[in-house]
Structure formats: C-alpha cells, structure tokens
Image: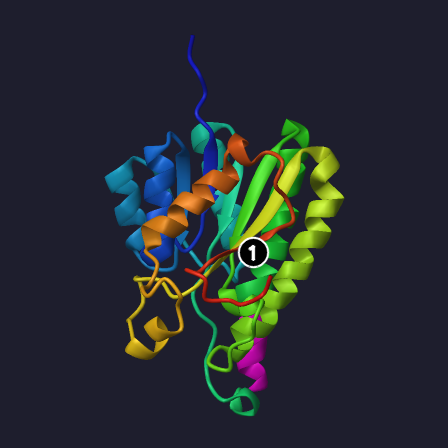
Amino acid sequence: MTISRPAAVVTAAGKGMGASIARKLASEGWDLALMSNGGGAEALAREIGAVAHTGSVTRVEDLQAVVDLCLSRYDRLDGVVNNTGHAAKGALLELSAEDWHAGLDLLLLNVVEMCRIVTPIFEVEGRGSIVNISTFAAYEPDPAFPISSSLRAALGSFTKLYADACAGLGIRMNNVLPGFVDSYPESAESVARIPMGRYGTADEIGAVVAFLLSDEASYITGQNLPVDGGLTRSV
C-alpha cells in the first residue's frame, strides 16, 4: 500500500533559516514546494527533490502560484511555513512611511494573504498546520529592529485570532520566535546577551518548525514559541 507523504510550502527558502527548515522537513519525509525571490529556492529544490517558484511573499500572485505548484505536483497541502526577509532598520522616528508600509507587506500581510489562500484547502481536508517565523523582539521590542518588533507583535495577535477561529476546523497556527541565529553575522555584544552564550543554529530552528508542523504537536496552537537560548526575559 502506498502511503502519501505530507506536503508543505516554505517561503524564503533559498538560504539561511528557510533553507534549513526545508532540508529538515525533506529529511523527515515531507514533499515541498519552495519559494524565494532569487534562484536559491530553485537550486535547493534540485538538491532535495522538491519543486520551486521564484517570487516574493509581498505579491499575492506569487503566494498563490507556490500553493498551486504544491497542489499540482503532490495533490495535497498539509503545512505552510511563512518565512520572510528583513524589514528596514534604523532609528525609530527616522524610518519613513514607505519603510513601514513595506514592512507591513513583508511581515504581516504576507501571512494574512497566505491564510486567505490555504484556509479553504485545509478546511476541506479537515486539517492543516501553519508556522510563522517571527522574532524574539515580538515579545521584548528591540530598538535595533523597530519595524520587525512592532509588526511581529501584531503577527502574534493575528496568530491567536486565527488559531481560535480555525481550531475547530482542525487547523493550527503557531509562531517561532528565533533569537540570534548563525545564519547572520555574529557579534560579541549580541552573544553577551544570551544566557546560553552562543548563537542558535538555523538547524535548531528547523527542528522546532518541523515539530510544530507535525502531528506530534497536534494539541499546540496559537502560541509564540521563543527559540532564543534564554535571550528574552518574559515568563
């Protein structure tokens, strides 16, 4: 008897955490449709036996295209990982309105639009899991990341609202809040803030995402899960 493999979409999968998440899911038996705004997702897809679409999470047409690609290739969709690039950084009141609007498209509306696309699919199947890659600064705003801190706090509220609304449909949504991760340049100042005394690895983030997508996390929804080596102080 042929056992169907679960299928997922992973955005911003061309490098860094997105690529590590994709590799981890592939190693655990997931079929994947990847997306990035450069050629990285296509190269990774060839490496791990996935499919890929080149596009931006800020364009609804591209979100629809990667979901359609997943369905056409695998005839199913079980999970989505909403990963993105970075919003503009700078002094709080020096960031322009354009910076904030671009951040809104990149960090929050991308998730809203993906939910519009995939929720009806999950509803028919009676199950589905969405994991959003957020940031530790959603809990404790960091002046180095004003737009990300603000809008990913909003993402936390959206996630709880969506999780509550869709739990009865068998659909789960959770956020992963990475701290400083080795896919970004390391600084002694940042390391000194981390109780574990080191940056996390992109592979560690991938392992947590794979768990939250899996049936092993079937009773977890609407949560913000810090994966930060103890960086945040909230309890």
> In the rendered image, is residue 77 in sight?
no
Mark 1 neighbour class, 10 Å CA radius: few under 14, some 14 to 19, many 20 or more: some
Question: In terms of secondary structure, where does tag 1 sit?
Answer: helix
Magenta segment includes 101 = yes
Q: Which residues are magenta?
A: 96-104
Q: Quadrant of the C terminus?
A: bottom right
Chief SS of the magenta region: helix
Q: Quadrant of residue 169?
A: top right
- Name the residue: 63% across, 56% down: 112
Residue tagged by mark 1? 60
Give 67 or 123, whichever is nearer the viewer. 123
Type of residue at label 1?
Answer: Val
Please give left or right for residue 110 compared with residue 27 in the image: right
Magenta segment includes 174 = no
Position above or below: 21 against 58: above
Position above or below: 188 against 172: below
Q: How many marks?
A: 1
> In the rendered image, is residue 176 in sight?
yes
Q: Position of residue 227 (x, y in %)?
A: 46, 56
Q: Quadrant of the N terminus?
A: top left
